[in-house]
Amino acid sequence: MDNAQPTPASKPSAEAPGTPPAPAAGKQSKSEQTRSLILETALRLFQERGYDKTTMRAIATEAGVSVGNAYYYFESKEHLIQGFYDRVTREHIETARSRLARRTEFASRLQVTLEAWLDVAEPFHGFAVQFFRNAADPDSPLSPFSAESYPARQTVVDLYREVLAGSAMKLDAEMSEILPELLWLHQMGIVLFWVYDRTPNSQKTRDFVKRTTPMVARVITLSRYKLIRPLVRDADKLIRDFIVPENIGKAED
Amino acid sequence: MDNAQPTPASKPSAEAPGTPPAPAAGKQSKSEQTRSLILETALRLFQERGYDKTTMRAIATEAGVSVGNAYYYFESKEHLIQGFYDRVTREHIETARSRLARRTEFASRLQVTLEAWLDVAEPFHGFAVQFFRNAADPDSPLSPFSAESYPARQTVVDLYREVLAGSAMKLDAEMSEILPELLWLHQMGIVLFWVYDRTPNSQKTRDFVKRTTPMVARVITLSRYKLIRPLVRDADKLIRDFIVPENIGKAED
């Protein structure tokens, strides 16, 4: 398709000069545009100069906004990273959902979900190593394992709930409860692999995903057996007690 | 036992003044002492100032040796890290071996081996986070997954071969071949957990080890079943193809 830029013919053009345009579907409000501009500028500077060396002042100057304005949208550099997270997560979920439609085989659903993440994150690959140095520490609010990241993490855990629910694979209630979080953890493993992947378009990570998804499917199928079930339970409990401990709050105790 | 420092009574004491003492069991040669001194000083400075900010010149000055002498023992800062690795590995293997004696239960053998690592590494915990930032990149020669780390890695893989061989657990030839490397990878996971553990004496990591070792033992026991075997094979092949690729050279192809 070779469409020209669509003209907003159906919308009233009675916008007074100086008035910010009202938010419209498919179009960002002025406020959202400024927020986006600051975030994009920050990500570019982080990539060029490194996260530690980039100040909020430099970001504001480069984006052409006042320092006060920059702080209005993002309280700190860490909030910028959180904004980056949120954006990648939102785009990942949208992209994955569109690719999940009409697929029923679990391994294939898992594969397209992970590939959607790789496609969405690829433009930020250069920044990822730099960023990972700050995010690898589980005590950092930037860590995907931190309490601060709980809402973003839950959004992705919910995506994996959909990946499972829409598949032809039969699962009992216990596994349906346990698996989404384990699949999120699997994604974190893929992300770690990707951070250090230097092949063009992260081809090595893509091959890694193709290799691991059928294995994950097989482990899940095996979890129905009495022999394996206790191990899956222990793994789940281990993760709750040691890796994402703030989830303990969800359990009744 | 409360032995006093043993005197080298059985050795000739005809050492000329100015001649470096000959290496003796339990006693370091002058050259080994200097090497140790430089390494200790470097580790202290890395911990105090950070790895990136510590120069070879500063290490030499602080150790009271000439810069040329420092470079004679360690070609670069990276070689110092390699020296640190080698030292921890050597002490780990010694400590683990002494604790493995007369233990036959596999889970217990695995546990004492990992605890030996924690005991040996604990004095360097403060330095570990700083260091990990440089070692996490698999393309860095400092990474435990790098080609440069192959000899050190093989020493530890061999230790895990002993952990398995000395246990009461029955293993066939294929699993005996595959498992030592998987157990080394498990140790790397424990190390990663430890790097970010802030509890006194790394108590959380110690609890984590206590929880995971019986699980690992159970997975290995299950690997005898036809149902599980293909998964263990796939996991092994996955690691060889993606995680420690230089090991491919060992296979016939």
Image (cartoon, coloured by chain):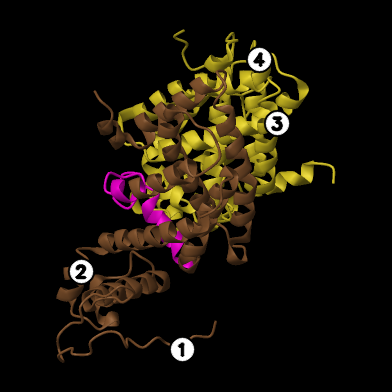
Chain colours: A brown, B yellow
In the picture, the disc for residue B230 is: 3
Query: Do tag 1 and tag 2 residues touch (Cβ < 8 Å)?
Result: no
Marks 1 and 4, how far apart at CA: 73 Å
**Circle 1/circle 4 CB separation < 8 Å:** no
Q: Position of residue A140 (x, y in %)?
A: 31, 49
Per the model, the C-alpha gap separating discs 3 and 1 is 54 Å
Q: Nearer the viewer, mark 2 or mark 4?
A: 2
Q: Chain of mark 1?
A: A
On the same chain: label 4 and label 3? yes
Amino acid at circle 1: Ala
- Displayed quadrant of residue B103: top right
Identify the secondary structure beneath mark 1.
loop
Disc number for residue A4: 1
User: Disc 4, disc 3: CB below 8 Å?
Assistant: no
Give the camera-side residue of A30 and B123: A30
Left-right relation of B153 to B3 = right
Categorize mark 2 by other alpha carbons within 10 Å: few (<14), some (14-19), many (20+): some
Residue furthest bottom in the image = A17
**Bounds of the magenta segment:** A126-153
- Chain for mark 3? B
Find out whether the residues at labels 2 and 4 contact each other: C-beta distance under 8 Å. no
Q: Amino acid at mark 2?
A: Tyr
Could you tell me which residue is drawn at 64 percent across and 10 percent down?
B168
Q: Which residue is mark 4?
A: B166
Q: Type of residue at label 4?
A: Gly
Chain letter, disc 4 residue: B
- Marks 3/2: CA–CA distance: 52 Å
| Dot 3: element | helix
What percent of the width, then of the height, locates residue A160? Answer: 44, 45
User: In the rendered image, is residue B44 in sight?
Assistant: no
- In the image, residue A100 sits, relative to residue B13, either above or below, namely below
Q: Which residue is mark 2?
A: A73
